Image: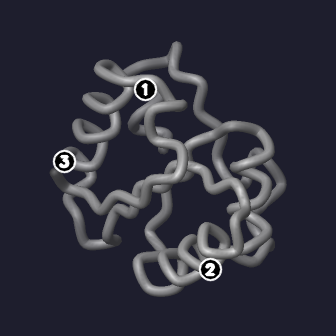
């Protein structure tokens, strides 16, 4: 995420570490992102989708979630996130689970 901030310092981006969420389980991270109206960016392509769907199916508010595989080139990941930020609003992604790259 630091690469994204270097490219666009005005981006309202909060890392899990900075938010004190580093040791939280996926359901807790999803709940916090939903409560604070944030879009979640995660490398957890294994369990995050499972918890996202469980939350959604339970009728709970779900944040927008972007899944970015660990193996994706960092430059590509940065470009993807910046493009999304430039052409959309966070509210447009609420309740959506998206895998990247485009």
Q: Residue at x 19, y 55 (%)?
A: 101
Q: Position of residue 61 (x, y in %)?
A: 69, 54
Q: Which corner quadrant of the image does residue 39 belong to?
A: top right
Query: Is 68 on the left or on the right of 34, as rendered?
Result: left
Q: Position of residue 92 (x, y in %)?
A: 45, 33
Query: Is 96 on the left or on the right of 100, as rendered?
Result: right
Residue with the most extreme top position: 10
Of pointers 3 and 2, the one earlier in the residue sequence = 2
Q: Position of residue 74 (x, y in %)?
A: 27, 52
Mark 1 vs mark 3: give the one in front.
Answer: 3
Please tell me whether residue 83 is drawn above or below residue 61 in the rendered image: above
Please tell me whether residue 87 is drawn above or below residue 73 in the rendered image: above
Query: Is 38 on the left or on the right of 69, as rendered?
Result: right
For numbered disc 1, what is the local secondary structure?
A: helix
Q: Which residue is mark 2?
A: 54
Of pointers 2 and 1, the one earlier in the residue sequence = 1
Q: Which mark is residue 20?
A: none
Mark 3 vs mark 2: give the one in front.
Answer: 2
Please tell me whether residue 24 is drawn above or below residue 13 in the rendered image: below
Q: Are marks 3 and 2 in contact (CB under 8 Å)?
A: no
Q: How is the image coloured?
A: one colour
Q: Which residue is mark 1?
A: 6
Q: Which residue is mark 3?
A: 76
In front: 43, or 53?
53
Q: Are marks 2 and 1 in contact (CB under 8 Å)?
A: no
């Amino acid at each position: 995420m630091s690469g994204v901030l270097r490219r666009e310092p005005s981006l309202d981006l909060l890392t899990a570490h900075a938010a004190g969420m580093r040791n939280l389980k996926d359901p807790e991270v999803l709940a916090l992102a939903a409560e604070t109206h944030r879009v979640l960016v995660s490398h957890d392509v294994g369990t995050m989708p499972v918890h996202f769907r469980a939350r959604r199916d339970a009728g709970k508010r779900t944040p927008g979630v972007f899944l970015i595989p660990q193996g994706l080139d960092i430059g590509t990941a940065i470009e993807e996130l910046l493009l999304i930020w430039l052409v959309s609003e966070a509210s447009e992604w609420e309740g959506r689970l998206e895998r990247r790259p485009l």
